[in-house]
């Protein structure tokens, strides 16, 4: 095999679309790509048949993912103009924790005609936030019993993770729960569809499915939550573990037909979109935090030692790279918040002005906001419009805009929302540094890196150099790196990262004057964060309860 | 004089326009009206010459008011089709505290060429909120010295009132302060322009200019604020007092030429738009609270006894009607908040949907919001987007929207803002009832009475029957009633109110189920109100300070 004429394909399954990218094995050069928006996008208000969903649900249709294989992969091959016979491996990454309820042959339950109208038969997307009550019970009981695995999850398990989602399914639709053979991470389900074998990657197994030190939470704990939940992990989750970069199957004839790739090439173990990005930006050493910033944000950092970081999402031995502890934290809404704002709160005059200037609404608001001095808008926001994953781990929390006056303008709020997400990141980084995990560099991957104002605000708020991925396809590149390792082109992920990864170091650096000004606003943010987030005033939780009751 | 063929004209000077209405003396029937939007509206961002104003300023141009006399009055006469010779009197009402700095001949200082570019030479509109620092000093010192007049103003003097505005003028533009012969309430300035004499009506003298028991705050108190402020009231405010309904002058030849009215007819003493509305809706008995709801809200109620109501704006003996104590409270922003929202935060899709439905954006949002159950939107807001006049008396406070999620829609926020203003009214009413001033009926005057959803929300939140003015010109009718008394057609204001006033009693009544649901949301509002409004977290004050510094 000649690495300069051999190729790998990375397929990145995001929240709204799947993207396949053809990369050169020798240097990670991107040769072509194909993208498909999921036909059903995210089901947040209704099922495909129009049945209304309760608040905080977020579902997907698994057939949409297969469409990505059928359309985005051939498009990427055509775009690259490479001979498919020279493609030596495929790697995929997926959002997580995103769970597909399946039969033993891998058929998703929503594809059974009798279950097409049952909401629990669909994929629960990572941002499904309707299992907070289950998460609360899990966290209370785990605290009471002082379960040993708690420390690995920052003290609190998110309602986004598998245990809460599984318990919600059991308690709200027992028939679906019983009929389901496994609740499979979407990453593993795609690997299965490609390679013909059910495996479970170490990353989602550890971070999202409580697999720690080769064991699950004990059955007595699960049975105390619900007598019928005792065997959740052993009966509904368990399966053969596949290490990151290992071969988890070989392309089946059916999948070869879908994709146009050679039958039998190795499929790398699945991975999570966030974690897979670290080698793509050469951020696999301690102190290098990778932030994947799109609809939401994930922060990943490695360290040689095991620390307990309050409110982190999780720490997994080798969860990102062999030989290091991989730490994960996250923010449930970032780009999603700006998109919500542009869709729901930007007046026609601003839309017209953007049109006249020939730029997008985001670009127009950003240009207006960029003209402001720090604090000039008089606002402070809480960035919990999609809940809080770290460090409060509570999806009953909601967004706040504070400081409104009759002269507040859309760009004021837009800037304040950007700042709020930066403050949220600072809370996370301070949790790491004060727990013994140093952070010296933030490497940004994902769509938001293109917003220079946002990047500069983050550098100022965090007082850190911000490096940025130079590939537009950070996640897909990470998957391609894993594919190259699975195909045997590199000895390990670190070696592949050195050859194929890429970034611009310190593209943004902090300005001390602005950083000082932000310290004052950050202090206000923290006071509100702790008041609303740590129990002094549980108004957000009560409002969500009132809302659910009013809609019932 | 035959009351059935005699007419009076009431002129209501609002925040954005002046409206003249011709009324029949016998029964208050409205025969014709004319309106003029002030050419300069409100100067909030720049002076007429384009010079930028600091945050929280709100100025007006007095020549705009004269334009109302010249254009709206003749229009009203023409519209009514009555012989001007049958008009027997004129009454006016004005927003307050709105102050015109003038020379001894009544010339506003901004009309002197050398002062056209000086912001302090302009009219300071009631909602000029840039004197909060002066108000804070006034309130601190008054508390320290336990000034006897404090109780008459609910314990705190508003930054909207004369003392704070006068002190700001002294300290920020000494030349204008010294050159100014008097700082005249706009109501009194208009009466002066019509009738040729400078008088001061008991209403603004008492509520806005600290005239209590025929005395001003003592000079030692004023001198402690600022040595040069000792004679503020005696030198810059004082003048002959004219009781409500009394004759404050007779139409001059010049004003007769402007208006087309007969020279020499009596001009009633000036009045405040809010207070003048009470007789127009036959709400001059104890227990009947009149709420004037437009850009802002004023609540007025009379009682036989003198009580101290924390956070009220003021109590004045005969301030509304002879023989009773008139109480005033207020909310600095109501309609202004909804207008801000529609201008700054309603997306193009909503605007298009309103257009397609052939209704205004307000009507469209109202229709969408009306379909919701109480609490369904999951939001609670603080209605301080224009500060808080009662009961916190602090214009450094600002607005809050809490409970935002990715599915929050414009109509959700719109409804929550309406509810927040209703909660603000409930706080005020509870302050009155718990201080011994009963409230049995709320009579609504002003533009917002046309929004049936808003009216029903208020009835439900307040658990009170809501009566509504049947005249669209509640304030102008009140002014006309005072004109009729000044002209001698009625013995007193009560008698004129009985004959000329009008309302629909209990047009909206509370629904107990919704009222109970609102109790839960109101409890959340109160907790946030007290947390942000009573010193536990002064974030709003600090953000305004940061904002001022950032802009400087």
Image: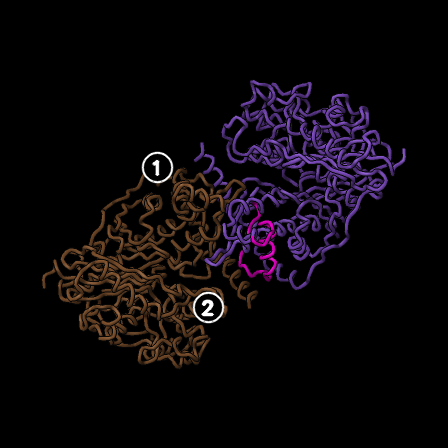
Chain colours: A purple, B brown
Characterize the local packing of mark 2: few (<14), some (14-19) or many (20 or more) Cα atoms within 10 angstroms. some
Number of labels in the image equals: 2
- Give the percent coordinates (x, y) of residue A471: 75, 45
Which one is in front, B459 or B296? B296
Asked if residue A381 is among those painted magenta in the image, a careful observer would answer: yes
Q: Chain of mark 2?
A: B
Q: Quadrant of the N terminus of chain A?
A: top right
Of mark 1 and mark 2, the one earlier in the sequence is: 2
In this view, the residue in front, A239 or A251, is A251
Give residue B233's quadrant in the image.
bottom left
Q: Is residue B252 above or below residue A406?
A: below
* Disc 1 with disc 2 on a shared chain: yes
Secondary structure under tag 2 reads helix
Residue at x 59% of width, y 43% of height: A336
Tell me which residue sits at (52%, 40%) in the image.
B407
Q: On screen, A91 above or below A343?
A: above
Q: Which residue matches tag 2? A: B133
Q: Which mark is residue B513?
A: 1
Residue B175 counted in the magenta span: no
User: Looking at the image, can residue B302 be seen?
Assistant: no
Residue A359 location, x and y as percent?
60, 51
Q: Which residues are magenta?
A: A356-384
Left/right of residue A380 with respect to residue A287 in the rendered view: left
Spatial CA distance of label 1 from label 2 is 44 Å
Residue A82 drawn at (x, y percent): 81, 34
Say which mark, if any, is on residue A155.
Answer: none
Residue B526 locus on image (x, y percent): 42, 50
């Amino acid at each position: 095999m000649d690495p300069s004429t051999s190729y790998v394909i990375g397929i990145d399954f995001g929240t709204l679309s799947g993207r396949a990218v053809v990369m050169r094995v020798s240097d990670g050069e991107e040769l072509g790509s194909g993208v498909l928006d999921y036909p059903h996008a995210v089901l947040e208000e209704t099922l495909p048949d129009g049945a209304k969903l309760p608040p905080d649900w977020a579902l997907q249709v698994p057939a949409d993912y297969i469409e990505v294989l059928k359309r985005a992969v051939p498009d990427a091959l055509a775009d690259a103009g490479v001979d498919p016979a020279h493609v030596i491996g495929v790697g995929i990454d997926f959002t997580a924790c995103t769970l597909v309820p399946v039969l033993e042959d891998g058929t998703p339950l929503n594809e059974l005609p009798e279950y097409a109208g049952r909401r629990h038969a669909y994929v629960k997307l990572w941002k499904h936030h309707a299992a907070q009550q289950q998460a609360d019970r899990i966290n209370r009981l785990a605290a009471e019993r002082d379960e040993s695995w708690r420390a690995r999850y920052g003290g609190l398990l998110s309602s986004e993770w598998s245990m809460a989602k599984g318990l919600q399914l059991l308690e709200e639709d027992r028939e679906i729960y019983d009929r389901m053979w496994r609740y499979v991470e979407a990453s593993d389900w795609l690997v299965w569809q490609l390679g013909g074998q059910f495996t479970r990657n170490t990353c989602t197994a550890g971070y999202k499915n409580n697999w720690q030190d080769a064991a699950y939470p004990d059955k007595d704990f699960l049975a105390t939550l619900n007598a019928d939940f005792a065997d959740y992990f052993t009966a509904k989750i368990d399966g053969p573990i596949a290490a990151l970069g290992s071969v988890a199957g070989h392309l089946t004839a059916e999948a070869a037909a879908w994709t146009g790739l050679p039958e039998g090439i190795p499929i790398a173990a699945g991975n999570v979109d966030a974690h897979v990005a670290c080698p793509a930006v050469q951020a696999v050493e301690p102190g290098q935090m990778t932030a994947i910033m799109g609809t939401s944000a994930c922060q990943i950092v490695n360290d040689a030692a095991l620390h307990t970081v309050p409110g982190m999402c999780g720490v997994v031995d080798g969860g990102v790279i062999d030989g290091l502890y991989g730490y994960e934290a996250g923010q449930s809404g970032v780009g999603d918040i700006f998109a919500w704002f542009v869709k729901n709160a930007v007046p026609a005059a601003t839309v017209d002005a953007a049109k006249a200037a020939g730029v997008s609404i985001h670009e127009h608001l950003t240009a207006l906001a960029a003209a402001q001095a720090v604090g000039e808008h008089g606002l402070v926001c809480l960035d919990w419009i999609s809940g809080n994953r770290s460090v409060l781990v509570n999806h009953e929390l909601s967004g706040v805009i504070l400081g409104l006056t009759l002269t507040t303008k859309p760009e004021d709020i837009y800037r304040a929302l950007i700042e709020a997400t930066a403050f949220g990141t600072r809370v996370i980084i301070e949790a790491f540094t004060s727990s013994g995990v140093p952070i010296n560099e933030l490497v940004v991957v994902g769509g938001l890196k293109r917003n220079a104002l946002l990047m500069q605000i983050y550098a100022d708020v965090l007082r850190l150099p911000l490096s940025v991925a130079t590939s537009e396809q950070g996640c897909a590149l990470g998957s391609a790196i894993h594919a190259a390792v699975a195909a045997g082109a590199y000895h390990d992920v670190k070696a592949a990262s050195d050859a194929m990864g890429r970034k611009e170091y310190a593209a943004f650096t902090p300005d001390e004057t602005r950083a000082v000004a932000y310290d004052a606003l950050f202090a206000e943010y923290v006071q509100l964060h702790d008041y609303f987030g740590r129990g002094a005033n549980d108004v957000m939780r009560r409002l969500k309860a009132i809302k659910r009751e009013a809609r019932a």
